[in-house]
Image (cartoon, rainbow, N blue to C red):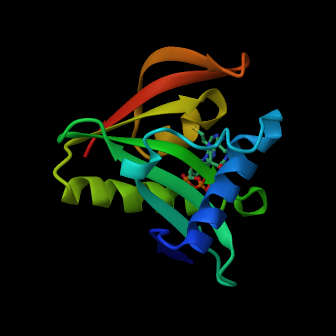
Amino acid sequence: MTIIEPKTADELAQYYQLRYDTLRRPWNQPPGSERADDDDTALHALLLDDAGSPAGVCRLHLNTPYEGQLRFMGIREDMQGKALGNLLVNYLEDKARSMGATTMTLQARDYAVNFYRRNKYEVVEKTYLLFGTIQHYKMTKQL
Ligand SMILES: CC(C)(COP(=O)(O)OP(=O)(O)OC[C@H]1O[C@@H](n2cnc3c(N)ncnc32)[C@H](O)[C@@H]1OP(=O)(O)O)[C@@H](O)C(=O)NCCC(=O)NCCS
């Protein structure tokens, strides 16, 4: 397993494709819906499996100099449950610390809350519904 920060057009295409496949396609959302307005100013992490194929994605954005936010975490379906999510969280937490952040925040889908709890995040509050069905919870952690 290797984590890279996608920069080339090909790496970025693979990165956004896996973001779409894990977080948008299952809810029949259109291609393009996986993009966010502030992606250009975020740090992106792409996990490659031993064959060099995309296996996981996540991004880090600094909301303030002290607060990082994880978004768009997705592990390829056949690779879930192998601690790859943990690898990406740890990688981006280290990045956030090195950038000076002291806390991390995120909006967890209801079924991912326990994954983040295993990574020592705590629920702050129930927040919004995505696509009318997926309840989100704000979670935070001291870095
Ligand atoms: C949620 C997701 C990111 C977890 O990644 P993963 O690689 O499958 O999880 P890991 O194997 O790293 O699991 C880490 C720990 O969390 C636990 N865990 C993972 N998913 C869990 C879940 N849904 N419920 C409870 N515990 C869970 C694991 O048992 C493991 O515990 P351990 O460290 O004690 O062994 C992944 O399943 C995924 O991409 N799902 C689809 C997209 C998605 O929902 N993204 C999150 C949006 S907020």
**Along the horizontal axis of the image, is 51 left or right of 97?**
right
Q: Residue at x 49, y 41 (%)?
A: 116
Q: Residue furthest bottom?
A: 51
Q: Residue at x 54, y 32 (%)?
A: 108
| 131 relative position to 100: left or right | right
Q: Quadrant of residue 112?
A: top right
Question: Could one spot residue 99 in this view of the protein?
Answer: yes
**14 or 139, nearer to the observer:** 14
Q: Is residue 60 above or below residue 4?
A: above
Vertical position of residue 7 compared to residue 85: above or below: below
Seen from the viewer's position, the closer of residues 101 and 131 is: 131
**Residue at (58%, 43%) from the top-left corner?**
35
Residue 127: percent from the left, percent from the top?
51, 16
Residue 59 is situated, as x and y percent measured from the top left of the image, at 46, 51
Q: Quadrant of residue 134?
A: top right
Q: Where does the N terminus fall, quadrant-wise?
A: bottom right
Residue shown at the point (29%, 36%) measured from the top left: 63
Tell me, yes or no, if residue 42 can be seen here: no
Q: Position of residue 49 (x, y in %)?
A: 64, 76
Give above or below for 18 relative to 33.
below
